[in-house]
Amino acid sequence: MSARFSLSFWTLVAAESLLVTGAALSFPFLAVYLTVHRGLHAGLVGGFLSLSIFSTAVAHGIGGEWSDVVGRKRVMLISLSGRSAATVLMAWIIWTEQHYIWIMVLHLLGMFLGSLFTPAARSWVADTTEYHRRVRAYGFLRMGSNLGWALGPAVGGALALASYPMMFLFTALAFAGSALTIGLGVKDSPRSHHEEGMDFKAAFETLSDKRFARLCLSSLLIGMVMSQLVVALSLHCVRYLGMPESRVGLLFSLNGAVVVLLQYWASKGLESARLTSGLTLGCILYGAGYLGVGFSGTFAAAAVAVFVLTLGEVLVQPGQHTLAANIAPEHHKGRYLGVHGILQAIGSGLGVLLGGLGNEHLAPYWAPLPWCLVGCVAFAAGWSFKSLRKRLTAKEDGDGRATELEEVPV
């Protein structure tokens, strides 16, 4: 199966795995650090983290549009180098116990710079694979990412008990290593340059395509759900289940391990089905899993719930990126994937904000209540994806099995 993809593709998979390993070392524990060790309210921390995710929405739009003009690889390298530098400064701020506002400023900067990477990388994949191959290509990217997600939190949980500055320093080194890997091993996409300049008005006019707008709305809703995994789940487990950070890290590692083991098979299944059908099923599994989190009373029950929601993740993540790439015009994939990323990031930001508020104001009355609301949003997203099916051509919806499509050489 690997022979069908270029060496540049597999290098990108390895680089993204290293990138996510670094992020997973520290990001899941930032909320815990600010609430437990700096004494900030969960609502304030949730608001700050949601603001940082909103900043990624802006970065998605800029990164996608910019990569259409200057090339995917250049944007990826600038993104990773800048994020590494910002994270080194965060480690120093934590080590010297400077005011927490500087942690917030640098985290915002790092998230913004780092999020230029995603639309550029996803557009690179869209440039170099045809319709029927994209879902598997994005699936392999998810496998690489979640190998990092499986390793990072377990190590990060141990480092959190010993040294938060060291945890962020290792994160910065991973970002730098990812940039070096891409710089040495990835050839730029031949389709990623055009003579037009950046046009943000034209970018937002993509939403005049009602099919693309419905996809973005669906992704916004499921983005609200997906973002509960990091902040809301960690706070719920520490506050209401009494778990130490190390056990919370094991839940994240379980999530990553399940994706690594099942993503290939899920992507293969999506190749023989409509993308919208897989996305609908994924949303239902997400909702069921988060309902399980709310009603969990033990680590084992929480682990089962995380397993179920991860089954939803392996369907939703590659499916929505593939659908966005399939709808996008050939020479504006960065633009379309950037706008799609904006709406998904807005959903993630809203999810983090509402998750923090729910943890602070609803869970003290009844711990499962916030998770019941999360489940309802997941089911609404599933209905939205299902209703999109009749607006798509069979090819756009992933039914390209009649002809074996080959990869565009890179």
Image: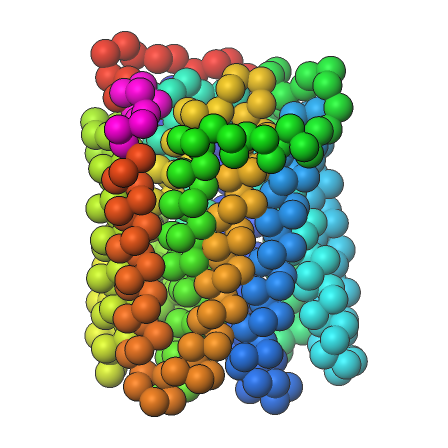
Quarter where residue 405 is shown: top left
Q: Is residue 249 above or below residue 188?
A: below
Q: Is residue 172 above or below residue 203?
A: below
Q: Is residue 65 left or right of residue 129?
A: right
Quarter where residue 43 is shown: bottom right
Q: How is the image coloured?
A: rainbow
Percent x, y for residue 292? 23, 70
Q: Residue at point 43% right, 25% down?
A: 327
Percent x, y for residue 71? 68, 26
Q: Residue at point 53% right, 81% down?
A: 42
Percent x, y for residue 383? 26, 47
Q: Start and end of the magenta stretch?
A: 389-398
Specify the principal SS of the magenta part. loop
Q: Residue at point 41% right, 24% down?
A: 326
Quarter where residue 375 is shown: bottom left
Quadrant in which the N terminus appears: top left
Q: Is residue 167 left or right of residue 208?
A: right
